[in-house]
Image (spheres, rainbow, N blue to C red):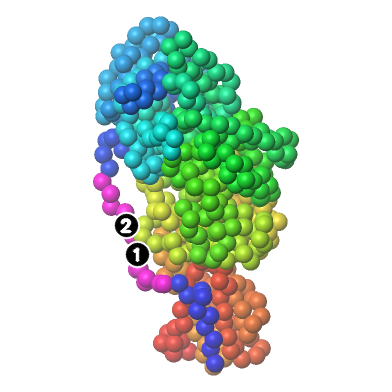
Amino acid sequence: MLKIISLFIVTVFFITEAFSQNEIFTRQDTLRGSITAERAWWDLTYYHLTVNVNPADSSFSGSNLIGYQVIEPNGLMQIDLQPPMKIMRITQGGISQKFTRDGNAWFVQLNAKQKKGEINYLTVEFEGKPKIGERLPWNGGVNWGRDKDGNPFIVTANQGDGASLWWPCKDHPYDEPDSMLISVTVPEPLVDVSNGRLRKQEHHPNGTATFHWFVSNPINNYGVNINVGNYVHFGEQYKGEKGSLDCDYWVLPYNLEKAKEHFKQVPQMLEAFEYWFGPFPFYEDGFKLVEVSYPGMEHQSSVTYGNGYKNGYGGRDVSKTGYGMKFDFIIIHESGHEWFANSITNYDVADMWIHESFIAYSENLFVDYFWGKEASAAYCRGTRLNISNDRLIIGSYGVNREGSGDMYAKGANMLHTLRQMIADDQKWRQILRGLNEEFYHQAVKTEQIENYIAKQTGLDLKPFFDQYLRDTRIPTFEYALVKGKLQYRWGNCIKGFNMKLKVKINGQVQWLEPTQKWQNLSHEELIQSVEVDRDFYVAGFLCTEIAADNQ
Ligand SMILES: [Zn+2]
């Protein structure tokens, strides 16, 4: 009698070829998404972004002082700012510079000779009514809302669309300034909360106030944010792996008591993630949770929160196992991005799985830390419901195009599968912590992550990553029982796919090393049952016909 365990059989579409992603890209996509000659010659060192927030006409005006080191002498520089925002003036050393616009890219012809190794500064003055963000964070921009008391509540989010939606910058993830000062002027008594630490607060006679926030670490563009509201503040100290970490919380006054209770999940999050990933990567800038009017975003050292002070994600359990209701998805997921996204940043957004796969997986690690390994595995398997296998997880390089939304649940299940292959949780933890040491505060490519894990495990992981990141098919364990003997191989997979697989034969754990060729397993007893370990994200298929041919 053959016993098939149905749980591991996911819906299998026998796709014969990898899905081709025929997309047409424009010159604007290339200007935005590639390291153009006008970007490559200079390395960001500093931004001082000054923004006047004008709720009366929904406009921003200000300047960005851009510090950079000359890598190779060149006189033409690309700065990004998307219409309807406008650059009014660009100066270097107080002298106006000539510039032209090509869509979202502005090209500045610098008068002064740019000498190799020199650190220079450029001031870009801008103004305009930035795009309205109606469905933050998916539809980026500025949301000019009001809180329940009728006070202005103005927030920004721009992942995908780009920071250049509202401020002029080098809008590509490969380059980050070493530090950044953000000075935001708002009508009193409103408060601005941005990234890093509040260095100074100034009150002006005209009824406005300026908040100066300083980030002492490299920061990605999309992480920079402005949150203006009638905020109140509370905080605590977390005793972590690198000492005392300041945790600051900025919420609306009517949610203060709820927040004090609900944000007890923050030290829990820090405890679990420091265990799995290593020290919080921005002790110098502190950890911050800031209430906003949209679900949330991983803004660096200013994680935004709008999940209604409830567990789950918008009241739902993304895993449908019950474990998803044991924690606040936004607190856990968005804060997890401080490690993968803010500290380890994708070099090109085509590699955004580095942010989302590890952090979708971090939800499991949080569950693992507090409710145990089986709970975490159940949560991970539960999220398979959210996989569509529609497009490749890796997007298109050089054109600012991310891959499939499968970078979340499928990416997490890929990492969960990898953990099974490694079959040593302490080693797996050391790899996760090692990634955070090796690539601390860096922009990295997919290959760097792949190579690091392959080196640490000694496994040939190229076919594994190619299968899950660069193909849409679910590898299928094809097997047959012929006269009590097992025949098996991998099907529906890329050429050379050779992942080892844990199975139970007659209830006993056994590792198989399937390839695309049929292999026979000789077993002392008659094989009566074959059960694929359900923590592997694979399909199983019983091939009676093929078995007959293969006898
Ligand atoms: Zn995320």
Q: Please say whether residue 510 is one of the residues in the magenta stretch.
A: no
Decide: few, some or many residues near mark 2? Use Cα within 10 Å; few <14, some 14-19, many ≥20.
few
Q: Position of residue 515 (x, y in %)?
A: 51, 71
Near-viewer residue (76 or 335): 335
Which numbered marker is on residue 410? none
Label 1 crowd bin: few (<14), some (14–19), many (20+), radius 10 Å: few
Q: Residue 100 or 452: which is nearer the viewer?
A: 100
| Start-end of magenta stretch | 11-24
How far, Cα to Cα, is label 1 from label 2? 8 Å
Q: Amino acid at mark 2?
A: Ser
Task: State the residue at coordinates (51%, 62%).
Answer: 319
Q: Which of the pair 496/545 is nearer the observer?
A: 545
The residue most toward the top is: 94
Marking on residue 17:
1
Residue tagged by mark 2? 20
The three-letter code of the residue at mark 1 reads Glu
Residue at the (43%, 42%) spot, across then down? 294
| Prevalent SS, magenta region | loop
Q: Are marks 1 and 2 in contact (CB under 8 Å)?
A: yes
Q: Secondary structure at mark 1?
A: loop
Image quarter of the N terminus: bottom right
